[in-house]
Image: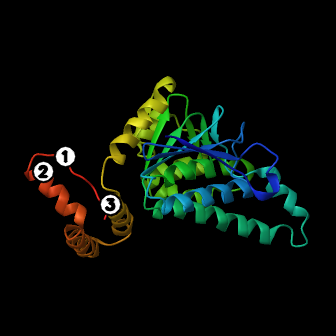
Amino acid sequence: MAEILNIKTPEALDQAPLATQRLEGGILRLVFNNPPANTLSEAMLAALKSALDAASDDRDVRVIILAANGHLFCAGHDLKELTGHRKDSDGGHAYFKALMLQCAELMQTIVAHPKPVIAEVNGLATAAGCQLVASCDLAIASEDATFCTPGVHIGLFCSTPMVALSRNVHRKHAMEMLLTGEAVTPSHAREIGLINRVVPVDYLQKITLQYARKIAQKSAHTLKVGKQAFYQQAEMNLTDAYAHTAEVMTLNMMAADAEEGIGAFLEDRPAVWRDE
């Protein structure tokens, strides 16, 4: 049975939801519902963070898909919202800092989330929207998708998107996007490692679901351990990375699901996961 939820901020209960959720077969589909730009406004950041936090401890959620309604995946921060705070007594300094930290917290929530997160990208993913794609564990894009970090065009270098971008693509490719602000085609985004796959727009949701269903069949405990270790070792030197992952694999071997999975393989039968 699918569970459908709407995410609204308390002060916007009479408005259309900023995002919608649908849970089916262990796959939580979280859809941005603020077209045409689907901006990461203060309210949207809070709504997404709340949904991800709730999914973290929900045993029924095994994989998360981030998608968007409309023809644009995410245009990044709401520039009108930002500009409005220039009238604050400090010129907006406190608000700008709080918003950037709020956004950074959301991106780190995705990386640290115990469940795999897949971006399903159709249309433009720009600035913090591109950062969001880079922060996800996997990204599947349609042939209509484009990616850019265009802050330089308006005098605002995409410094926070740079963090996620530079951890996913080679430095020179990242710098090219950051310095020129030019849009990157989905095929080029795949070449440089920003996304995993490019598919025709009519097949985007189908292919993304195929990835999600394959992952959802795995032990949730194993995925949690492996995802956490992946990002931890990536920040270490070679010696520390091997020492850390050796310890992770040792503890993983002691888990009930590892015992079950190895036993099922040796006995040529399907594994029955306990997610522990």
Q: Position of residue 164 (x, y in %)?
A: 51, 57
Whether tag 3 and tag 1 are in contact, CB under 8 A, the answer is no
Q: Position of residue 273 (x, y in %)?
A: 27, 55
Disc with the residue nearer the chain's start (3 vs 1): 1
Q: On the rendered structure, is 8 left or right of 63?
A: right
Q: On the rendered structure, is 138 left or right of 221?
A: right
Q: Is residue 165 visible?
A: yes
Circle on res. 185? none
Circle 3 residue: 275
Query: Which quadrant: the C terminus?
Result: bottom left
Kind of residue indicated by mark 3: Asp
Circle 1 residue: 270
Disc with the residue nearer the chain's start (2 vs 3): 2
Alpha-carbon neighbours of circle 2 within 10 Å: few (<14), some, or many (≥20)?
A: few
Q: Position of residue 239 (x, y in %)?
A: 24, 75
* Frontmost residue, 119 versus 197: 119
Circle 2 residue: 265
Q: Is residue 210 above or below residue 137?
A: above
* Frontmost residue, 162 versus 22: 22
Q: State the count of labels.
A: 3
Q: Dot 3 lies on which element?
A: loop
Q: Position of residue 36 (x, y in %)?
A: 72, 36
Q: Dot 1 lies on which element?
A: loop
Q: Is residue 163 visible?
A: no
Kind of residue indicated by mark 2: Phe
